[in-house]
Image (cartoon, grey):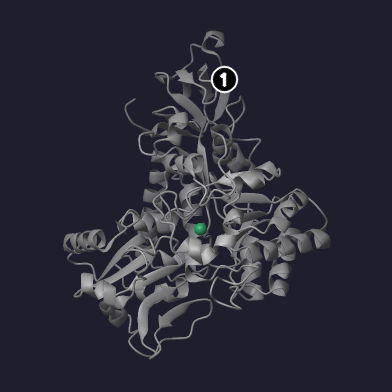
Amino acid sequence: MAERIEIVNARMADSGAPLSVRLDGEQIEWVGPPEDMPNDASITRRIDAQGQVLLPGFCDSHLHLFWGGVTLDQLDMLQITDREAATSALRAFASQHPDEQLLCAFSANYTFLGAGTRPDRHALDAIVPDRALLIMAVDGHTAWANSAALELAGLTDAVPHLRGAEVVCDTSGAPTGELREGGAMDLVQRFAANGGREGICMAGDEPAASASDRARDKATLRRALATCASYGITTAVNMDGNLYQASLLGEMAQAGELPIRVSLPMRIAPHHDAARIAALIEAAQQPPIGKLSFGRIKMFMDGVFDSWTAYRTDDYPGREGDRGEPLFTPAQFNAICCQADAAGLQIQVHCVGDAAVRATLDGYQAAQQANGARDARHRIEHIDLLHPDDLKRFSQLGVVASMQPVHPPGSSGLPLEPTVSIIGRNRWGDTFPWAALHHAGVPLAFGTDWPTAPLSPFNAIHAALSRQPWAPDCPDQRLPLSEVLHAYTAGGAYAVFAEGARGHLAPAQQADLVLLSHDPHDLALDATTCHATLTICAGDIIHEVSR
Ligand SMILES: [Zn+2]
């Protein structure tokens, strides 16, 4: 029989008013002031919230469960900002992992060796000369290998020419150690203890997987999901779907092993042929399996600013004629949009530069013209730079903005440079425009893009509440706490067509809840104190610490 849980002595986030909630199995049965709660003898568990704030469970609208799970074993370099700190952290990590063939670190800032120094193999050799080392940049689009790692991967002189990826070489043709995009990073990553499994979902293809690979990969997903639960996340949009990950998660969902709800968009890449695209669209049309749902596809329109791969409407500062490039031709992209939209699917596209946003809106418009208008809620992910002319097109096309408050340089441990110079001073006012989009009536869904940023929603909410403009003439993009929480709960639910089922504390909504250790208003000042003391998903307690 389903548990009947009662949570008493909780508080509402906005007003601080006392609140009690009763759950009947997977659903919320009753919500209201404690004095109005009817007596019920069939309650199986009563939880005293001790005055803590109760929210609908968080929805992280953009993360990478598998890659995030892999990084739980790697060195996190996000907080490292100079050579000295990098040296001691990397050397300590190397001595703690004496048997690793390839040492892996992640979330490194582009300036982790100090401002103005771009990492290369020589700099890494000076820190770790005798072991192979690979450091992934914070955005996941660039990595740096030392000489031992390049040697391990056979990247000594002649390097392969890759589509949409690059082993960067110096003028003599020798690799510098910089690897751009998954196709290049894979060449080295595959020597990691986990076989470079972080790349298996990112590249958009199907990895080879033995029975033991499957077991290990499921264990990685399990750890990632448990980490989500520990932060109060009850819905995760896992952005790198392929048929392999769909089958792993499908088996886990079938067996009731998913602690939280997972939405899995199927990733379509530019190199996919018609048969592959058709297979992915068909997979995306399958009905939900337990807590696992489909219904959407994901594409990348461009890269990131730090490697000059974001596709923009104007030239990069100091690089005449260079605006980056779209990863899809307009004809190719629009055709996929029309095909997926006709199949009733939602489309989600990574767009960092403003030309990428524009090309994606063009694709959504083409789909609407071809198939007729419907409540499609196609999404754009990231939107680091938006051309003002395109703002109103979001509402016209019913597009959802899926954004990550942890991404603006200057927030959440990210340095301003080199990114703000690569963007260019004249465009600072058009960056990460979540308040501008909100005020234009565009639905917002927040997330972290974990592991490119910490998974903690509290850290992300802090970043959203405390973001500072880069210059006095830049607009203030902060939103009030109520809107930030909305984008992390109801906004996330809307963005996966689940607003009727979750994202609100109301009867008949799914019993997905989180209790916070501290008043979320305090998050404007402090990211680290607040944590989840209780997470409930579908009526099951999936995380609990002492209150
Ligand atoms: Zn992502």
Name which residue lies at 61% across and 44% down: 435
Query: Label 1 belongs to which residue?
Result: 31
Position of residue 384 in the picture relative to residue 51 (left or right)? right
SS class, disc 1 = strand
Position of residue 193 in the picture relative to residue 513 (left or right)? left
The quarter holding residue 36 reads: top right
Disc 1: residue Cβ within 8 A of ligand 1's nearest atom: no
Q: From the viewer's side, name the closer residue of 88 and 96.
A: 88
Residue 90, above or below 146: above
The quarter holding residue 505 reads: top right
Quarter placement of the C terminus:
top left
Residue 471's spot in the image, x, y percent? Answer: 52, 51
Residue 23, above or below 446: above
Is residue 8 at all visible to an observer of this figure?
Answer: no
Position of residue 196 in the picture relative to residue 380 (left or right)? left
Total residue callouts = 1
Residue 282's spot in the image, x, y percent? Answer: 65, 62
Q: Amino acid at mark 1?
A: Val
Is residue 248 at all visible to an observer of this figure?
Answer: yes
Dot 1: within a 10 Å radius of its alpha carbon, few (fewer than 14), some, or many (20 or more) residues? some
Residue 350's spot in the image, x, y percent? Answer: 58, 61
Name which residue lies at 69% across and 63% down: 358
Residue 378's spot in the image, x, y percent? Answer: 68, 54
